[in-house]
Amino acid sequence: MPELAFDVVIIGSGAGGGAVARELSRLCKAGKRIAVLEWGPRLREEEFTGRELDMASKLYVDAGGFLTRDKTMTLAFAKQYGGSTVVYTGTSLTLQKKTLESWSVPGLAHDDLLRRSQKYLKENNVHKLEPEYLNDNNRLFHAACQKLGYRVEQFPINVKGCRGAGLCNLGCPNAAKRGTNRVQLPEAERNGVTVVTNCRVDTIDDRSVRATVKNPGFGEPSPWPEGDYRIRAEIVVDCAAAVNSPALLLRSGLGEKLPALGRYFTAHPALILVGQHGRPITNYFGHPKSYYCDEFAASKGFLLETCMYFPFVTAKNLTGFGAEHSALLRQLDRLQMILVLALDAPRAENRVLIDRNGEPIVDYTLSVPVLESLFESMKVSAQIFFAAGAERVHAPAGSKFFIERAEQDRLDDLIVREKMLAGRVSITSAHLMGGCRMGRDADRSVCDSWGRVHGTEWLYVADASLFPGCAAINPYVTIMALADRVAEGISKRMLA
Amino acid sequence: METTAPPRLLSGRQRTFVTALGHALVPQTRGLSAERQARFFEIIDTMLATRPRHMVRLLKIFLVVLRWFPLLRFGGRLDRLEGERQKEALRWFQDSPWVSIRTGFWGVKTLVFMGYYAQPDVAAELGYTPSHAGNDQLRA
């Protein structure tokens, strides 16, 4: 088995790994050797086809359909040069002060996080799209929320040269989204960081990792030959994200001394809801996600966002089947869509485990409060669809497949709690958080506020698994800000 | 992935049943050409090939339950029930009081939807014709 040596090994290249790699790359000039080990491939530009299943299979773990243990929720997370920053929509919000306060992490101040977040907003070209680039799907949501008196805001997004392909979740075919694959990783590489794709880290040992390089048959081949490797490093930074970071640490035998490892996993469980208009609207042309409504975040525990998905994803997220289901799908160019995110509380029993082969299992139970929030969100969303002019609405917990416009005053009767059952209603998540939460001590947390694993001075975590609770916003900017902080701590230590 | 045929993980009998199920879940699958029908199963086989063996085994067991359980409750095998009676049986699985039955049904349904709706030609028939220059369409 070949043995290699670096000063720093970073595992994963998404929002966390990309930010750490770029920040630490300044040390390359001082002779430090830094490697990023990324499980996924680096796709060639021509491989971003925008075809639904093709891209889902190449970019996502389990093609975006990773199931929780009880199979009531699917988790979407990417493995790829750039991680999940390749497949997000680029919505760029900073963490609210009240959320950080609820996390109660000693030594982590909102001002510090905000300052770091703003650095990434700037370098990722975050801005609001001009009105001419907003499609009907987004405009109708905004107008309806205003009509109903609901607070509605435009998302700042991180694009440059966006041509409105509307395929953000399948990897931008126009290279417009400013993920770590476009900004931080290329800069890190120019500064001397080695990025090794198709390289899966199996375990972390004492100041070393064991990894396997295997090419998947698409994308650029790994710069290292296929095979097993042992890589020594003075510092190891786990940025494999909220499922694989805790799983990797568990596989490496850290579970015994860190009882909180894998626990307090949160996910913003989500629903995709649709309303059908009587005429074609522009929905899949243009950027898909321009507005959000947080009117019900505090009172009912959910956020609403505009969204637009692809035929198969749309089909699987509707409840029901047969002629009505098909009829709705055949009106795809008339559909208005809303994504609901439930703000789930951190619970110790929601956690990442590993099976006998060391593969991650996510044991997550959709709690009664989460199901209540999602149920309530259907009624609010139906009101928004009708206020926007929709002729009929599909509510997954509806007593019938379609709720017609003439029935809009009977939403409380037609959307019924008994139908809001886990496993019956399609629930997904793309905001995976927790599992290596920050905190004061090893009894209830895994890392300190600088991302250092309690009791293991050479091992750090820098990704969404650090979150002690859900972010209550789209999380990538916060991940980058925390990773920036972790990198600063490492940098100071290495230069000391 | 696009050039090599996936292994056939469903037996001939299982394919026949999934085809019948497809007719109930997505009526348009009744009229699929031989080429599209082959693609339908190619998509399903490709997806199953990436899943752990125990998941595929669970799916196969659930296909048996889905086929035969309606004999007890609805008086016939699922693929032999007609019209409304078949829908009633499918709704029973979807709304079942047991979460494992609901998730099993959801899994099979999702696989059938994938086999049909993930076909690029079908997307165009639904009116879904994205463009890499979508902003031009907004201004058109």
Image: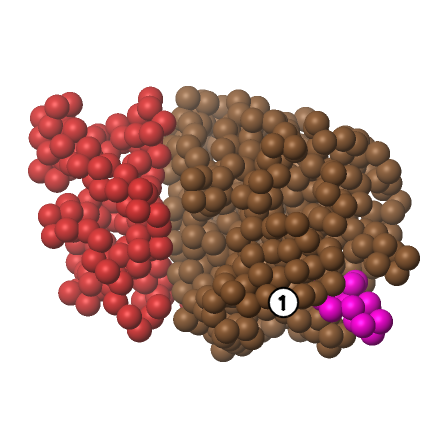
Q: Examine the image and state in which quarter residue A397 appears.
A: top left
Q: Colour of chain A?
A: brown
Q: Tell me what hue chain B is rendered in.
A: red
Task: Name the residue rendered at 22%, 42% in the picture.
Answer: B60
* Residue displayed at 19% across by 47% down: B18
Please state which of residues B42 and A13 is positioned toward the viewer in this rendering: A13
Left or right: where A352 falls relative to B36:
right
Residue range highlighted in magenta: A21-34
Rendered position, A401 above or below A288: above
Q: Which residue is mark 1?
A: A4
Q: In this view of the protein, which residue sits in the foreground, A467 or A310?
A: A467
Q: Is A213 drawn above or below residue A344 in the view shown?
A: below
Which amino acid, mark 1?
Answer: Leu
Mark 1, secondary structure of its residue: strand
From the viewer's perspective, is A202 left or right of A437?
left
Q: Main secondary structure of the magenta part?
A: helix
